[in-house]
Amino acid sequence: MKYKAYTLRNFRSIPQFENIPEEVKRNIEVVGSVLPFKVNNYVLDELIDWDNYDSDPIFHLTFPQKDMLVPRHYNKMEEALDNLDNKKEIRQISDNIRRQLNPHPAGQTDKNVPSMNGRSLWGLQHKYREIVLFFPTAGQTCHSYCTFCFRWPQFVGINDMKFAMKESEVLVNYLQNHHEVTDVLFTGGDPMIMKSKVFERYINPILDNIETTNVQTIRIGTKSLSFWPNKFVTDSDADDFLRIFKKIVEKGINLAFMAHFSHPRELETPIVEEAITRLRNTGLQIRTQSPLLQHINNDGDVWADMWRKQVNLNCIPYYMFIARDTGAQHYFAVTLEEAWKTFRKAYQQVSGVCRTVRGPSMSCTPGKVQILGVNEVNQKKVFTLRFLQSRDPEWTGRSFFAEYDKDAIWFDELKPAFDDHFFFEEEEELLVAEE
């Protein structure tokens, strides 16, 4: 299969769209003018049930839906498309809406970007002590776009919203000066959108300087196994990628694919099974993760099925996330209590080899906060929470309580249960001041 992508410009030529109602197409045009849209022929041909597209999870995962914009934003964008001919004016309205959608949540721009020699390194993020995120310039797109993606600002063409870095030498320099870093995460976009020769140009400086850093793990955040497994099977440079991965492993580096699978259907095609087998034969490991999403996978049975399929393919279930407070969060969100119940329902159905998964987890400003449950403490109903990861390593693994709120969908809606502030809030202010 040869890769073919459809975007807002040509989506009406999608073969399966011949009998799609005009209203659906109009919604894609309006919402897709604000939130990024791209889908490819593998997703269209292999993953979507077109006889039931309106309720299909992969259709919702890849095609913009009207309710992904709140009414005032949808109406504003539709009015602009109907009444304006000037593309610049339309773009200004679109960008104004985008800036109201919390494009960079959890301190990504003001707390996560490191500096070196007085220069902010906009292609890196260093939130947690042991791991640095690297945004290679050539990897800032994807084979298809997920409608929930919290990295959506990378794709909409606003430069001051985008993280990217061309020079892997800068990354190496940073690693040489920060021996607390053991893990480098290639992220995007999707690094696996790159050709093998381009990817190797980013990897080689790290491998060539491995003795002067403390890098022990290279992670690759990718949706390619779901959206284009051909990358590692039939693409012209598939074998070259496998060679590069094997070279990394033979250097003594733990290479981990952080694979995004949002629904069991993404694991069911013969070619994804073949791609997983070929990748694992290089010595890398595959860890899997996804947010819990209304309209897509908000069902404990679906998650249990997905974890079992992943383990049977020798992948490691890693995270169930809560949809982040950005973009179309209101469309995908479930309450924190419902998320916990869904996680428990799935967790109870699987054997211990599937229970490597952690969640439900919120990647919020102070760190990754796990919902451990709804409990009663001192005759008060509370959320029991725990840091799985944190800005200050001293917080990691520490449990704390928040007032129960049946409607809460994100951490910043919670209040401390037994004090006027959470234990880490004063420490976080000091931490930022010190930085």
Image: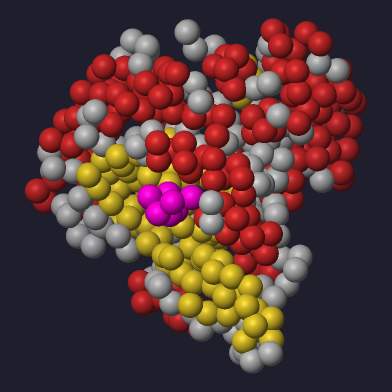
Q: Is residue 365 left or right of residue 378?
A: left
**Between residues 191 and 316, which one lies in front from this camera angle?**
316
**Image quadrant in which you'd find residue 61:** top right
Q: Residue at x 57, y 36 (%)?
A: 263
**Between residues 39 and 359, which one lies in front from this camera angle?**
359
Query: Is 10 rendered above or below residue 243?
Result: above
Q: Residue at x 62, y 49 (%)?
A: 300
The spot of residue 277 in percent (x, y) is 32, 26
Q: Is residue 267 visible?
A: yes
Q: Is residue 420 left or right of residue 77?
A: left
**Between residues 321 and 112, which one lies in front from this camera angle?**
321
Q: Quadrant of the C terminus?
A: bottom left
Query: Is 334 rendered above or below residue 368?
Result: above
Q: Residue at x 36, y 77 (%)?
A: 394
Query: Is 93 rendered above or below residue 325?
Result: above
Was residue 433 drawn as part of the magenta stretch in this picture?
A: no
Q: Residue at x 32, y 55 (%)?
A: 131
Q: Is residue 358 left or right of residue 35?
A: left
**Main SS of the magenta segment?**
loop
The spot of residue 107 in percent (x, y) is 52, 60
Outermost residue to the left: 211
Which color mode does the image show?
secondary structure
Q: Is residue 125 visible?
A: no
How many marks the image carries: the answer is 0
Q: Is residue 278 left or right of residue 42?
A: left
The spot of residue 57 in percent (x, y) is 67, 33
Q: Which residues are magenta?
A: 350-357
